[in-house]
Image (cartoon, rainbow, N blue to C red):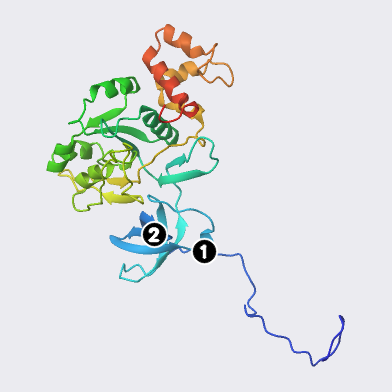
Amino acid sequence: MRRYGKHTDEDDIRVRPSRRGTRPRTHTRPKHEDAAEGLVLTVDRGRLTCLVEGRTVTAMKARELGRKGVVVGDRVAVVGDLSGAKDTLARIVRVEERTSVLRRTADDNDPYERVIVANADQLAIVTALADPEPRPRLIDRCLVAAFDAGLEPLLVLTKSDLAPARPLLETYAPLGVRHVVTSREGLAEGTGAESVRELMRGQVTVCVGHSGVGKTTLVNALVPRRQRATGDVNAVTGRGRHTTTSALALPLPPSTTGEDGWVIDTPGVRSFGLNHIQLSRVIHAFPDLEEGAALCPRGCSHNEPGCALDAWVADGHADAARLHSLRRLLGTRERREGD
C-alpha cells in the first residue's frame, strides 16, 4: 500500500471531486419578487394551508426561513405550485411583518412563549355561564393578554339558558368590555349567532376559551358551511374534552352591506400563562387612569402604599371600580386561574 507524506509532490495522486460540485457557496438568497401573497389558515404537522388568490394551497416552510415560526393569521409570500391541486406543495419564502401577536405561556414560570395567532384585531373570550362554571381568573388573564397585544377584547357568554349572565357582567362592567350573551337554543336555531357576527364584521377575531364552553359550537353557528367536531363536558371532572386540535381561520359569510371578516377557532386551553407579559403595558387599556399613573413613583406596581392612583381616584379623576379592576388584572400573575 502506497503511503504519502504530508508534503508530497507526487503527480499520480487521485483527487476525488466534491459531491457538492465546484460552484462557490454564496449567502445571497433570492428575493422572490414574483411570490404570491397568501394568508395562513391552519397549520398541521409542518404543512400549512394558505389562501392564495382565492385558492386553498398546501405549503411548507422554506429552509431559508430557518427557525422562524409561521402561525395562523400570518401574511406570507408563497412560490411554487399554487394551483391547489391534490398532492401539490408550495413553499412559504417570506413572512410579512405582523400587526399584532397573541401569545401565552404554559404557566407563569414557563420562559417559553407560544404564539397563538398573528394579525388579529379582536380577542373573543368565550365563557360558559354554567356546565362548566365560569372561571373569572382565566377571563382576567385573557384580558391582560389582549391589552398587552393591542387587541380589542369581546366577552362572549354562552349557555345563558342554564344560568343568568348579570352576576358575571357586573364584575366586568367597570372595564367597559363589550359583551354578547348567547344560548344553546339560539345558536342551534341559527338566530343567536347574528348578534355575535355583527360584532366581528370587518375584523379578524380569535376565539379563546377553555374546553367545553361552546367555542366551536359558536364558530359552527357563525360559519354554517364549515362544521367542526364538538364534544360534551365530562360529568366527573366538570371539564370539557378537547375536540379542536389546531387553530383554523374561517371567513364569515358576507353581509348585506358587503362587510366581511374572519373568525379563528383555537383549541381549548386549560391554563393561560402570562410570564411573557409586561404588566406595565396593561395600564394603556385604562386611559382614565394612565395620566394619574404618570405621577407614581418609579417602578410602582400600582398596588402598594404611595401609589398616586389612590389620590387620583380620590380627587374624582376616575372611578374607584376602575382602579379595583386594574389592580385585579395586574394581580393575575400572582394567582392561579382556578383560585
Above or below, comparing residue 152 to residue 265 in the picture: above
Above or below, comparing residue 139 to residue 19 in the picture: above
Residues 140 and 162: in front is 162
Tell whether 263 sits left or right of 110: left
Residue 123 visible to the viewer: yes
Q: Quadrant of the C terminus?
A: top left
The image shows residue 259 at horizontal and vertical percentages of: 22, 44
* Amino acid type, residue under disc 2 in the picture: Leu
Total numbered labels: 2
Q: Residue at x 45, y 33 (%)?
A: 148
The image shows residue 68 at horizontal and vertical percentages of: 51, 54
* Badge 2: residue crowd in 10 Å (few <14, some 14–19, many ≥20): many
Q: Residue at x 31, y 70 (%)?
A: 86
Mark identifier at residue 63: 1
Mark identifier at residue 315: none
Q: Quadrant of the N terminus?
A: bottom right
The image shows residue 25 at horizontal and vertical percentages of: 63, 71
Provide the residue designation for mark 2.
48
Please report whichever mark, 2 or 1, sits nearer to the chain's N-terminal start: 2
Q: Are marks 2 and 1 in contact (CB under 8 Å)?
A: no
Residues 113 and 202: in front is 113
As helix, strand or loop, the secondary structure at mark 1 comes to helix
The image shows residue 117 at horizontal and vertical percentages of: 40, 46
* Amino acid type, residue under disc 1 in the picture: Arg
Report the residue that reaches farthest toward the front: 236
Residues 332 and 205: in front is 332
Q: Residue at x 67, y 84 (%)?
A: 17
Q: Give the Cα distance between marks 2 and 1.
A: 14 Å
